Image (tube, grey):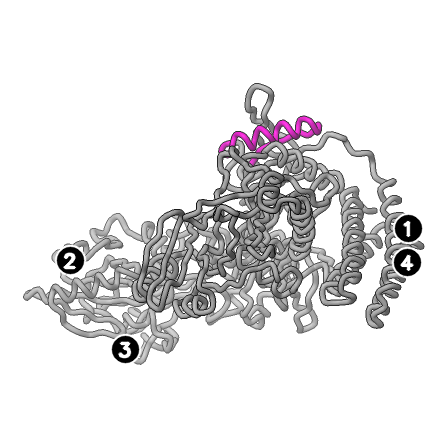
Amino acid sequence: MLTIKEKEQIINISYTIIEASDNLISSIQKEKINQESIYIFSTIVEGINSIQKSLVKDEQLYDEIKKNFEHVIQSANLITELFEQNYTNKIYEIIQFSFKPKFKIIIKHIESTLPERDKSITIGIYHSQENPANFYLEERLNAMLDAATKKNCRTIFFTDSDVNLSDKVINAKYKTETEWQQVQCQFPDVIYNISKNPIHKQSRIERKLRRMIPFTSFLFGNKFDLPKKMVKQRTYAQLLAPFKIITDTSIFFEFLSKNDKGVIKPVAGARGENIYFIEKKDKNKYKISRDDQSEIYSENKLKDWLYTNILKNSSQYMIQKYIESLTKDGQPFDFRIHMQKNGQGKWSLTKMYPRIGNKNSIQIQIYRDGENVIDTDEFLKGEFGERSKQFKQNLINLSYNLVQHIDKLYGYAIEETGLDITIDKNERFWLHEANMGPQTKGHEVERANTLIDYCCYLAKNQIFFTNEFNNKNTDKGYFDARKTNTNYYKNKNELVGVFIDNSSNSDNLVTLFLLAKQYRIDLFYFSPKDIDMDESLIRGYFFENREWKEYIVPYPNLIYDLVLNKESKHLKELYDEFSTIPIINDKFYFEDIIHCLDDNKKKNKFVAPKNFKDINELLNIRKQLYIRCTSKDKQFLIYIEKLKNSDYIIKSNNLDTILNQLSTKHYLQDLMKDHQLIIYPFDNNINQFYTNSINVQMSKYQLNNWKVVNQSVITNPDSNIFTTISNKHNFYNSLDNYYENFLDHYKFKQLKHKVEEVAINYCHTITSHTNLSLNNVELSFALDKNLNIHFIDVFSLNHTGIFDNYQISNNSIKLLLDYLYQDIH
């Protein structure tokens, strides 16, 4: 049986299909069959397929509408054939007299199976970072509250921290007649989102809410993205002034060679800010104006100005041909037309008014205070006389046609925009830009009334819009649960996912998966491209009959992380998505754990120097230091020894020299600019160490127990203990084979036992003094000639570069079992 929400979703898709079919008719009537009409029809077919997948879950409902739905499918198939034959008239007839009527019958029948809705609608006013009640403009807030009250709607204000996803409640702010109150309430029927973010900038809370509740507002690109789309589609491209993105001075001057006047403005700008007017006066003279200020530049000085103000700026700028639109008095002007969707989901004109600038400036006056707004009729009559009514109607018609076209370019998801349209001296219409958040200071009440109506429309019909800025990654190979024929996995045991990188070799995991079956764990691996966050489903790979087979699985009970990259911006949203699922095997950095590695009994500690003075003071005491240097892409060790004449011996993997104090200071200061430096606590001379390091691979086999899996000696071509940390050409040798050659049996046995003991103690120290979830790690130690062990490094293992795959895998499975069956989270 389908749930009420699933039935409502089918109804919403059906209404969207009907609206798309109207757009298809409009498209083929204008230009016959073209790329646009093919795209619209493909979305209709996709919608029908989606409905069919849902209907088969409810046999009774499907039987009741089966005849009409089969008729819809037949009509769609027939339209496909007519597309190939270019029979537009016949397509029109089928849509109008067969396809749409049958769909409306289906909608009516499904609606009759739903319980009656409560007439009162709750509208959530939401911002992901701060509660809008704390910062929203008072005039706009009051207008929205008044409009909602008149429509019998309840408004609540909230942010991410107020949302409880598991209980589906919000600790929101609510305005009574006299005061603000904090109330706990159920999720709203619709959300008006003040901030419009692309999916990769949305918080986990916002992404979750968008799957459950209709949102009103979506991005539709910047000053470059929209014109690019319009040029590509060609429709209304003639309204755009020629432009170029300024990426270097040659593009700028080439544009000016073709256009003597131009406007420079930020691609992502708003409110008319940071806009410059440039005019070419003669071969080597250029005039730059901003507001009512101007200055003359030579070409060389203009290049300097461009570099400082435009190219060096963090914002991207464009240059656009200047369109001369002047009143009879020589003042620049344009029209702001504020368009909104209304209570029927249709576009309506909320406000239209002219804006006028100063004679000495190209800047148009933006009415921030809501006063002195010029009457449109009076302005048009003054400029165009008896033809003013025709110009006004042309403006209105163009605005409706243009906003519908822009809406279509962005998935029909836009709810409001401010169009800036002007008329040049030849009476040609131009579009300066379309704004996502137009100024409404002078007409907040009108805007609020229309917005609340649109919120009610989305809430009553439970319509979920989306567009390209809110869609998940659709690159080739990425999993989309709605477009796959992969079977669902029927798990009998606890489900555990192994999270691997897109480029990882799954063959390294075979032993782990074979052991999981023995312990009755349903284990699968998946990569970032296998996650469909919209549907909370994963394309998981199971090892069956000696091969990897893919199935669709829900989110697992536990995740074993082998990606180890939580700090990645690209992967942040995935880790946020799994925030309610236990994830084991954290990645960590040496610098993050040194605080817990110091022994209180020792006088020397790990030190993170801030400057050369810190290093030199330690050298005066200890005479020689070992310093670990880490940057984003590499790490290495350096040895520094201070000589009696105040010179310094410096050795590293690519340096062996003696420098004076000034040169040493500069060398270390340069290192500190892009490296994190850590001074090791041991002060032995470099000649007191053996030339090879000991590496120990450790595995946790119970929640608090560690086991040595392998001990090896790392040698490298340079025969230098302090190059092993950065050398990719290291050679691993068995500890037994290496040290038995020059240590007697008793000393060797003592050494091996001591290494094991030290390694286990370090692992316990790290896990007991941090919140890290560790599974498999590798530790590196230096050995001096007195067989004292000195800690060098520790890092996580991810089933690559391990010596005993069976032991590591076996311990990992036992640890997974402990996490699954003990209440530790």
Disc count in the image? 4
- Helix, strand or loop at disc 3? loop
- Residue 216 percent across, percent down from the top left: 64, 43
Find disc 3 in the rendering and name its residue: 719
**Given the image, on which type of amino acid does mark 3 rest?**
Ser
Tell which circle, 1 or 3, labels the residue nearer the N-terminal end.
1
Please identify the residue farthest to the left as the structure is shown: 645
**Given the image, on which type of amino acid does mark 4 rest?**
Glu
Q: Nearer the viewer, residue 422 or 415?
A: 422
Q: Quadrant of the C terminus?
A: top right
Classify mark 1: residues with Cα within 10 Å, few (<14), some (14-19) or many (20+): some
**What range is drawn magenta here?**
134-158
Closest to the camera, between mark 1 and mark 3, is 1
Find disc 1 in the rendering and name its residue: 65
Determine the CA span between mark 1 and mark 3. Answer: 80 Å
Tell whether 728 sits left or right of 205: left
Name the residue located 23 percent from the left edge and 60 percent from the top edge.
Answer: 682
Determine the CA span between mark 1 and mark 2. Answer: 84 Å
Residue 616 — which label?
Answer: 2
